[in-house]
Amino acid sequence: MIGRGTRLHIDKATGQAKKDFLIIDHWKNFAYFKLKPDGELDHPSEPLPVRLFRLRLEKWSTLHAQQFDTQSAIEELQAMLAALPRQSINVRPHWDELDQLLAQWPQPDHAVIEHLSKTIAPLMRLAPLCGLDELQFRVWCERLTVAWLKSDEAEQLSVKQRVQEAIASLADNIPEVRKVQEQRAWVATAGFWDHLDLARLNNLQETFAPLMRYRTAAPKNTVEINLPDAISQRSWIIYGPSGEGAFAESYREQVEAWVKRLADELPALDKLKSGENLSDDELDSIAATLNQADLFVTEDTLRKAF
């Protein structure tokens, strides 16, 4: 839109040249990129099979540290390794190591866990394990187990809600789901969660994970309301030499963010921040720095906005 606006144009009827243009920034892109010049940072998502393997590594390590029996956890990890497609070009270089891990599982130390997490875990994205709903439920169950082992009450509460919602969403008319009706009712009670142990957590995962393919979408009820729009008072200010304007609150946010960034770069602003006295030249340098495109900060615009 800026490109369109800055195109030169002569009105054929009057011979007048275009002098200005208006951009209506409905989604506040100008304000957003002034507050976050680099935009949103990329947060790559971790494939569910990789996440599941790493959680099971963490569970195995924690069980060992707390002197629990780790055989079941090791068998889960080995079963995931056995599911890897051996002919895959990504898996082939690891054949010897996979055979060794399947024959004899190592002791958990930091170097072993770091290696398995960084080298072997990423391969799990290639393994045809199960459906996404089942994988997601197993991830929740492993998170719950690790949180229980570490006595992380906040994490337990968060995952418990997801697990209960997933179980409650199973279709009632499926024979396999009807068979576990008692267990479903039990999981919905406080008694189930007040006395968690490893056996109960393992049983929870093995009972319900295979049934997750029978989840149903929660019905969405449309709620119609008839309320008048209420617009609170907003102050529009003109702050630029060519008629640039913004709502005062938006302008304030942008100015504050800019000044905070400048405080680490401009020596005079850093002195001001520290409460030191400034010379007239230093004050002039601050004023000159602030009164630039695109915010044109002056004493007058600051009075309007603040």
Image: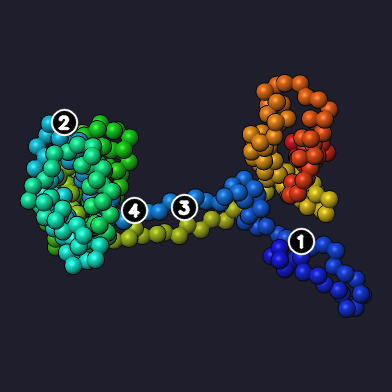
Specify the quadrant that holds the C terminus: top right
The percent coordinates of residue 74 (x first, y second) are 12, 45
Report the front residue among 82 and 111: 111
Camera-side mark, 1 or 2 = 2
Q: Please tell me whether mark 4 sits on a helix, a strand or a loop.
A: loop
Q: Please tell me whether mark 2 sits on a helix, a strand or a loop.
A: loop
Reading the image, the residue beneath label 4 is 46
The percent coordinates of residue 225 (x first, y second) are 53, 55
Q: Which comes sooner in the sequence, label 2 or label 3? A: 3
Q: Please tell me whether mark 1 sits on a helix, a strand or a loop.
A: loop
Q: Is residue 264 left or right of residue 9?
A: left
Amino acid on which the number 3 mark rests in the picture: Asp
Q: Residues within 10 Å of mark 1 (few under 14, many from 20)?
A: few
Is residue 74 placed above or below 224 in the rendered structure? Answer: above
Gap between marks 1 and 2, in whole Å? 66 Å
Amino acid on which the number 1 mark rests in the picture: Leu
Q: Quick check: marks 4 and 3 in contact, CB under 8 Å? A: no
Q: Which comes sooner in the sequence, label 1 or label 2? A: 1
Q: Which mark is residue 66?
A: 2
Q: Which comes sooner in the sequence, label 1 or label 4? A: 1
Q: Which comes sooner in the sequence, label 3 or label 1? A: 1
Q: Quick check: marks 2 and 4 in contact, CB under 8 Å? A: no
